[in-house]
Image (spheres, rainbow, N blue to C red):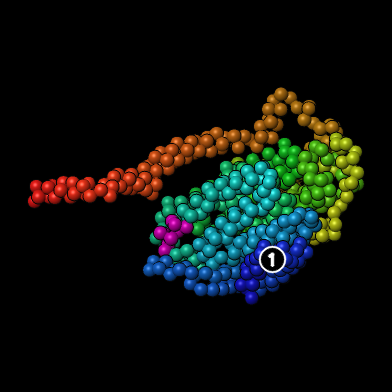
Amino acid sequence: MYSLIVTLPLLSALLAGAFGRFIGERGSVLITTGILILCLILSILFYVEVHLECSTVEVLWWSWFDTGFLHNPLGLYFDEITVTMLVVVTSISALVHLYSSAYMKGDPHLPRFMSYLSLFTFFMLLLITSHNLPQLFIGWEGVGLCSYLLINFWFTRIQANKAAIKAMLVNRVGDVGLILAMILIWLTFGTLEFGALFSSSIFQWVTDQTLFFICLFLLIGAIGKSAQLGLHTWLPDAMEGPTPVSALIHAATMVTAGVFLVIRTSPLFELTSYGLLLTAIVGSFTAFFAATIGLAQNDLKKVIAYSTCSQLGYMIMICGLSHYSAGLFHLFNHAFFKALLFLSAGSVIHALMDEQDIRKMGSLLHLTPISYIAIMIGSISLMGLPFLTGFYSKDLILELIMDKMYLSFVLWLGLLAAFFTAFYSFRLIFWTFLYQPISSRHVFQKVHEGSWNLILPLFLLIIASLVLGYFFQFSMLKDLPSPMITSMSKWTPTTLSVLGGSFALLLFLTFRVGWKGYLSKMGMVIYSFINAAWHFNFVINHFFVRPLWAIGLMTTYNRIDRQFLEHFGPEGVLTRLTFISSKNNLFQSGQLMNYILVFAFFLTVYLYLA
């Protein structure tokens, strides 16, 4: 029964992909969505059995490979972390499948799209239920492959091509980090199975330097997959894919894989204080950096994308303080209100005929009231205001940081990120729903809410964003100690969020046509710097991509491929053999006198040498 939750999405992907032209759009939607709903029911049953009863379940299928120095079975591993992730992945994926049936209606390639979604879900489920690191790596690479397929689903668009290739290439850096970590773990411990790896008896002879490098490589893998500072550039560009893809990638699957990797390997991180400190630093800078960029973005989906990057920074940050249950709890809550934000944004974009620039929107409050309520609730939950889902995890993270690192820059970056998050969330709401529209009237004449299968997922996610945080805190945070802070400090994150939203409201009421024109010269420089995402793309392209491209062209291609391999490789050997053969043909003239002369010559040489 436990194996079904992994194999069923693969079955639905194969059915929709291979037989989509025979079963049609309706058949593909019914099969893939129905199977995901069944997987959601199974995940809830597993959550009750494993999480609430504090048990662990191992399912061994067969021996994958067994050498003299490494035994690695293929199977599934269910613990409290696994079943929590199962609920997140299956619930969001089921809602995205249902939403896609309306959002992608009329697309001739809908069966292929539904197949990709199910395949994406399969690889994510394989990743989180893996019994060992090699099996996890298969799921890890699988979600990367599916992200390429889904981002590039509309493959005739050049920007989608570029975004998909960029996502693949940037994630290769994280993949190399994970591979190096696996190699170092095997050389150090002699096993890659989670159960044996986390046995406390095998750590006693390991040096601190070795543990630090293992955690460093694991962190590099998490940085690439979870779009942390430095390897984050692929995440905003991934918005080129259809909106359901954005919701699935940002809420429940690919970007959460890096956080899951850190939580899964937490026993290793706990043995090196430097590894934990580096993790907290990376998370804090990412949370602050992404929050500042969200202040100046004008693309509706990119604002939400950078908020994802910022919230992932919070998760990594709190893992660096050894509070993994708080990080997992925020991952759980974030999945629902972030899916709500993306799907409601998709509803607005769908109503406006694929317009994504918030400056061209406005006054949508009366035209799309359901989408307005959904984005409002999702934004308030994102800000962490009482008493929505995000409040119970985001404020808890900042309170725990106050308890451990009261005067550190990690805390101040986290608090500033909370202020900026509230500001850009209200800025998005004002531009999209409350400002006077700039576009012509005919653009808004046909604006309306979508069909029931476009709205139903929003209603369900609204309910989840309102109540899930309160109910799940008791089971997910049962072993977490309460932070020892004052009442004033406890309300600091909420106060900053309220101030950020109030500041955005003040600017809206003061400059109803936009406040950008009122900035000073220095203010415009700062705005341009933030709007360009701190020029990270320029720096990476100029100092990393171009030198590597030059090395690849001048050294690898020109000197190795075109010179060495062409002369000494298969093509060079073939060329020389052809030349020798052509010269040898000169002796095969068919004239008897030539053969006699050649025979006499070689006979003379032989007799002379003998």
Q: Amino acid at mark 1?
A: Phe
Mark 1 neighbour class, 10 Å CA radius: few under 14, some 14 to 19, many 20 or more = some
Residue 108 image point, x, y percent: 75, 55
Residue 342 image point, x, y percent: 75, 51
**Number of numbered markers:** 1
Q: Residue furthest bottom?
A: 1
Q: Nearer the viewer, residue 557 or 294?
A: 557
Q: Is residue 184 magenta?
A: yes
Which quarter of the figure is the N terminus placed in?
A: bottom right
Q: Nearer the viewer, residue 16 or 94?
A: 16
| Range shown magenta | 182-190
Q: Residue furthest top?
A: 521
Q: Is residue 296 magenta?
A: no
Residue drawn at x 69%, y 35% as measured from the top left: 531
Residue 471 image point, x, y percent: 75, 63
- Residue that carries the numbered disc 1 in the rendered image: 19
Name the chief secondary structure element in magenta: helix
Q: Is residue 427 left or right of residue 602?
A: right
